[in-house]
């Protein structure tokens, strides 16, 4: 499977050799019992996954610790545990923070433990997000193409077609406001840099790139600038709601029908069902609008990976457990058993399992997984997350929060780029602005 070469830093190459040497062979199982591995995760449905594994495997037992969600959850806990030398064997991470943990040597390079059969079982777009300079640092669970959720009843009521391009989306926003002054077509999220990143990716933006061991930053490249100017115009003309995602304000608007569309990753279908329980039969899903009808690129929002940590004494068993979680139908059925999920698995063979476990009635019987399959194939393999995305995202979001008070999206991006540079250089990275 081809991968575009991406370099974190020259220092990580040396770390790879050290970590590979110290993890080349796992210790034998404890005499008289299974090998016990520890697992940290905040993902919904993980408890039944672990229970199913433990009930069907006798040589490995998994001890699960459910960690909090958010910035103070698994990421912060793993950072502290790595420093203290008491990290778990396996940890759940999001794609955008993986480079930081790889750079810090907190996760193992598992390249040599991933055979071709395993590679072929997962989408190349997902592997690309966990591979740097040809080395694999985590295993993808899902990949989440961005899509457009929309209230088909509201659009039909006001004679508005589902937008297929961003020009149509803007016109639909104008038409809906004119027809129903209290309604807005969508929301500009002031607290989600990854959301903005996915939209920029679709437009061909690349915030980070690497060349010869040097990092390059450009948060205002042509693609990103196009996205920023588009949403700034909609904000300035009061054509969209401006609110933090998942806030009380946004939840109320979605539940009451004062916002008619919602843009997010595929996983958000289930979240929408929980947020707007009264919306059953009113919502549908469509592809994300395109900048050009012939352009097929789609960005992602969300997604999780499983990493074997540097502190694991049982990397072989840890990877066996991970492989089961991301490829075995029993594992995915167990994850779905705890409630509705619309996660799009990185393993194409599990899409049917995901579809079977999803209640289509909320979306009037629509086969949303057929749409997800088409959109996931359009996710590119050239997006690079930065080495300190938690800090970078926070900087961007501080600027986005000012948009409702006269700040601009471009200003937020410029400031975040300026303040990310010294932070990266302090890590000893060679950095330049494009």
Image: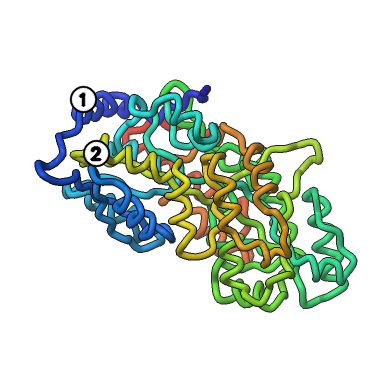
Name the residue tied to disc 2. Answer: 310
Is residue 422 toward the left or the right of residue 354 in the image? left
Q: Viewer-proximal residue, 285 or 98?
A: 285
Among numbered discs 2 and 1, the one appearing first in the sequence: 1
Q: Is residue 40 left or right of residue 387?
A: left
Q: Secondary structure at mark 2?
A: loop
Q: How far apart are the alpha carbons under marks 2 and 1?
A: 11 Å
Residue drawn at point x = 56 percent, y = 52 percent:
354
Q: Quadrant of residue 269?
A: bottom right
Pointer 1: what residue?
A: 21
Does the rendering let one see residue 39? yes
Is 284 placed above or below 414 here?
A: below
Residue 411 visible: no
In front of the other: 287 or 319: 319
Image location of residue 403, percent across then percent down:
61, 63
In-front residue for pair 187/24: 24
Query: Who's the residue at 72% across and 37% down the image?
Result: 296
Number of numbered discs: 2
Residue, x 50% and y 44% (percent of image)?
417
Residue 345 placement, left or right of 147: left
**Which residue occupies 81% across, 76% down?**
181
Give the x, y percent position of residue 195: 58, 53
Secondary structure of residue under mark 1: helix
Mark 1 Cα-neighbour bin, 10 Å: few <14, some 14–19, many ≥20: few
Q: Is residue 152 above or below residue 10?
A: below
Q: Position of residue 412 (x, y in %)?
A: 56, 54
């Amino acid at each position: 499977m081809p991968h575009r070469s991406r370099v974190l830093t020259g220092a990580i190459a040396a770390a790879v050799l050290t970590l590979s040497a110290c993890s080349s062979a796992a210790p034998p199982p404890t005499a008289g019992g299974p090998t016990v591995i520890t697992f940290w995760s905040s993902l919904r449905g993980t408890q039944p996954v672990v229970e199913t594994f433990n009930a069907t495997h006798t040589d490995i037992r998994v001890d699960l610790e459910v960690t909090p969600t958010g910035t103070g959850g698994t990421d912060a806990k793993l950072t502290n545990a790595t420093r203290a030398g008491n990290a778990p064997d396996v940890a759940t991470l999001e794609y955008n923070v993986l480079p930081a943990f790889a750079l810090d040597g907190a996760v193992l390079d598992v390249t040599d433990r991933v055979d071709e059969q395993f590679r072929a079982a997962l989408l190349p777009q997902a592997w690309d997000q966990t591979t740097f300079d040809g080395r694999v640092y985590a295993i993808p669970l899902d990949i989440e193409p961005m899509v457009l959720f929309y209230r088909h009843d509201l659009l039909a009521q006001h004679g508005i077609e589902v937008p297929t391009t961003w020009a149509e989306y803007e016109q639909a926003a104008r038409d809906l406001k004119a027809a129903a002054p209290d309604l807005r077509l969508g929301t500009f999220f002031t607290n989600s840099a990854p959301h903005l990143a996915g939209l920029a990716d679709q437009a061909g933006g690349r915030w980070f790139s690497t060349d010869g061991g040097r990092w390059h930053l450009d948060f205002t490249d042509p693609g990103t600038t196009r996205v920023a100017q588009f949403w700034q115009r909609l904000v300035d003309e009061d054509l969209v709601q401006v609110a933090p995602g998942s806030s009380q304000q946004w939840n109320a608007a979605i539940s009451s029908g004062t916002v008619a569309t919602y843009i997010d990753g595929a996983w958000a279908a289930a979240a929408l069902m929980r947020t707007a329980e009264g919306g059953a039969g009113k919502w549908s899903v469509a592809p994300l609008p395109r900048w050009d009808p012939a352009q097929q690129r789609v960005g992602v929002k969300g997604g999780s990976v499983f990493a074997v940590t540097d502190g694991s004494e049982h990397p072989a068993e840890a990877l066996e457990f991970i492989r089961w979680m991301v490829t075995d139908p029993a594992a995915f059925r167990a994850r779905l058993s705890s409630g509705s999920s619309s996660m799009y698995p990185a393993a194409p063979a599990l899409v049917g399992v995901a579809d079977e476990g999803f209640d289509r009635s909320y979306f009037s019987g629509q086969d949303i997984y057929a749409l997800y399959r088409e959109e996931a194939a359009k996710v590119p393999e050239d997006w690079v997350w930065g080495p300190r995305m938690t800090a970078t995202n926070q900087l961007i979001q501080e600027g986005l929060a000012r948009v409702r008070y006269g700040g601009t999206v471009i200003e937020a991006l410029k400031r975040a780029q300026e303040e990310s540079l010294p932070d990266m250089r302090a890590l000893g990275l060679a950095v330049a602005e494009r």
